[in-house]
Amino acid sequence: MIFTSLGFYFRVTAMTDAPTTDARASASRPYHHGDLSRALVLAGRRILESDGPAALSLRAVAREAGVSPAAPYHHFKDKSELLEAVAGEGWHELGEAIAAARASAASPREALREIGVAYVRFARANPAIYRVMYDGAADLATMPDHAKQDGSAWHCVAEAVIEAGADASDELELKLINIAAWCAAHGIAEMAGFREFEPLKAALGGEEAFIRAVLAHIGLFAHRQPDAPTASTAPD
């Protein structure tokens, strides 16, 4: 990639009449001063989606973004910090998808189902960034600050389960229901691509119909029925 702006590096190549592939790519991804951090995160995401995590490095991100090899170090000390930023981008997008799904639902129970569909749809459409999101979260002692904010994916799900009938005063039970909802959606997202399910998807009318059908069979929020009276407690 060849740039002429102050502070960028030059790579001298043999001159040709036609622009190089790198030059064409850089022309389609112009870098604007003041937004380098964002440009690097998006570059990292493109690399993850096209070549996988093994190909990701600060040098590779600099090359993809069209800046000098030293430029990323002004924003990220190492690859781990860059991955955290890329994961944060994913969590933000997932939160937006979940919030939109919840807002479009006609009832609290339908909102839970739509949230589950939105979650699985996001995971299936963004497998590389989805994996980075969860690989990073697995080793954390607590959720990142951005994941706890109002409007975040976690916050939206927590509100949705309360609206669907969970007891907001029972903190432990609420937390368990919330975790169950995430685990259910995560499990479907992980297994939805299994080839074994292709005939079932075809019979149901496609992958989204399959996802909805599976979610409909997960009674996470079904009200518990009271125990039947025993002989000693039954009324005379």
Image (cartoon, rainbow, N blue to C red):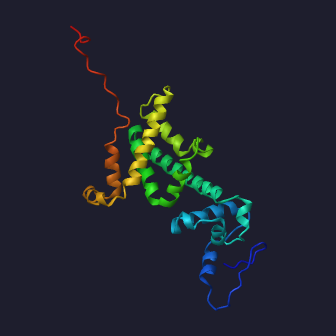
Q: Can the viewer see residue 222 in this picture?
A: yes
Horizontal arrangement in the rendering, residue 60 relative to residue 8 (left or right): left
Figure check: 146 above or below 124: above
**Residue in front for this viewpoint, 148 or 138:** 138
Q: Position of residue 111 (x, y in %)?
A: 42, 42
Q: Residue at x 46, y 34 (%)?
A: 176
**Residue in front for this viewpoint, 204 or 129:** 129
**Residue in front for this viewpoint, 64 or 36:** 64
Horizontal arrangement in the rendering, residue 75 relative to residue 24 (left or right): right
Check the image and name the residue furthest to the top.
Answer: 236
Asked where in the image residue 208 lies, by quadrant, the reply is bottom left
Q: Residue at x 34, y 41 (%)?
A: 218
Asked where in the image residue 3 lies, by quadrant, the reply is bottom right
Q: Position of residue 84 (x, y in %)?
A: 61, 54
Q: Position of residue 89 (x, y in %)?
A: 58, 55
Q: Can the viewer see residue 126 in this picture?
A: no
Figure check: 179 above or below 232: below
Check the image and name the residue furthest to the right.
Answer: 6
Q: Position of residue 138 (x, y in %)?
A: 53, 47
- In which quadrant is the N terminus drawn? bottom right
Q: Residue at x 49, y 34 (%)?
A: 175
Figure check: 219 above or below 89: above
Horizontal arrangement in the rendering, residue 223 relative to residue 183 (left or right): left
Total labels: the figure holds 0
- In which quadrant is the C terminus drawn? top left
